[in-house]
Image (cartoon, rainbow, N blue to C red):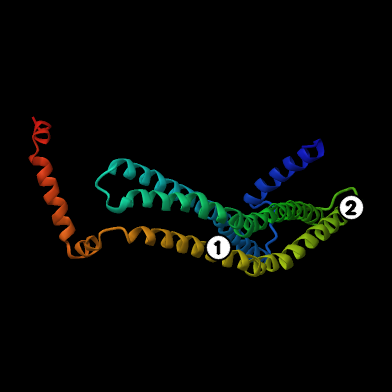
């Protein structure tokens, strides 16, 4: 920060304290304040959208990676026996293809059509916030000079040149502030309204990419399902599967080595 910038920051800090103490009257613009609140709401929502959109892609990778690890363990667990029609190996192949082919094929279009447009949109907020910050500073300068002019009117100075100078400085400050205020009041609603047509294509791409992944996952796993025992699904629905599992556990507990574990 330059020396002049530092002095302005110190002066504005003092002005802020005087405003809070009620020594300087603060200009209020309800229309602008409403538009800034609307912008803040959109800003938070868009930043959250960017975060969650990235999280979705990370979660997709993590899920398919976990599926592969589970399938590898199951395949080793079954070994050369116990899995009819080599179903554990077929399952491992299916989830590996889902992880190595489907997710990787969707990665680039997801980034280009979903993540990057959202990120570009949030990047505009930097300039908007700079303009909002500048408006706040110019408003503070204007209110300070307006209070100075009022004080000279209420208590005239022996120096007759002070009041005209203060009035010129106040007018200049008002013009700068008014220009920034009018610009933001007019353009913030336009930016807010533009969010829907801007994000519509990304939303459509998001739905299509999710649909593509779900279809691929369903197709690959449905191919594995045909090698599973048809009776298992019916037994699960009727509650018989729980009975069968409990019966298997009873037999395991009857083994001598299982009994030794309790000793």
Q: Where is residue 206 in the image (x, y as percent from the top left)?
A: 55, 63
The residue located at (41%, 46%) in the rendering is 68
The residue located at (10%, 45%) in the rendering is 251
Q: Where is residue 223 in the image (x, y as percent from the top left)?
A: 38, 60
Q: Earlier in the sequence, mark 1 or mark 2?
A: 2
Towards the viewer: 239 or 159: 239
- The secondary element bearing badge 1 is classed as helix
Q: In this view, does 14 lie to the left or right of 95?
A: right
The residue located at (34%, 42%) in the rendering is 73
Q: Is residue 99 above or below residue 76?
A: below
Q: How many marks?
A: 2
Q: Is residue 110 above or below residue 71?
A: below
Say which mark, if any, is on residue 206: 1
Q: Is residue 228 left or right of residue 259?
A: right
Q: Where is residue 108 in the image (x, y as percent from the top left)?
A: 61, 54
Q: In which quarter of the image is residue 154?
A: bottom right
Which residue matches tag 2?
Answer: 165
């Amino acid at each position: 920060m330059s020396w002049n910038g530092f002095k302005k920051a110190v002066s504005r800090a003092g002005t802020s304290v005087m405003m809070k103490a009620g020594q300087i009257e603060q200009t209020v613009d309800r229309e602008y304040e409403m538009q800034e609140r609307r912008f803040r709401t959109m800003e938070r929502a868009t930043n959250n959208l960017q975060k969650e959109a990235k999280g979705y892609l990370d979660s997709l990778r993590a899920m398919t990676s976990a599926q592969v690890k589970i399938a590898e363990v199951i395949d080793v667990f079954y070994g050369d026996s116990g899995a009819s029609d080599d179903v554990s190996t077929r399952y491992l192949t299916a989830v590996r293809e889902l992880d190595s082919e489907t997710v990787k094929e969707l990665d680039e279009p997801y980034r280009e059509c979903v993540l990057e447009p959202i990120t570009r949109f949030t990047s505009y907020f930097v300039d908007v916030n700079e303009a909002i910050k500048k408006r706040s500073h110019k408003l503070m300068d204007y209110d300070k000079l307006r209070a100075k002019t009022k004080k000279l009117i209420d208590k005239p100075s022996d120096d007759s040149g002070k009041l005209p100078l203060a009035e010129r400085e106040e007018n200049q400050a008002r013009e700068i502030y008014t220009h920034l205020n009018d610009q933001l009041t007019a353009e913030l609603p336009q930016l807010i309204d533009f969010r829907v047509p801007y994000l519509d294509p990304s939303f459509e791409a998001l739905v299509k990419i999710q649909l593509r992944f779900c279809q691929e996952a369903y197709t690959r796993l449905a191919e594995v399902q045909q090698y599973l025992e048809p009776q298992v699904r019916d037994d699960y629905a009727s509650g018989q599967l729980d009975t069968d599992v409990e019966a298997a556990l009873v037999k395991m507990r009857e083994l001598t080595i299982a009994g030794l574990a309790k000793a």
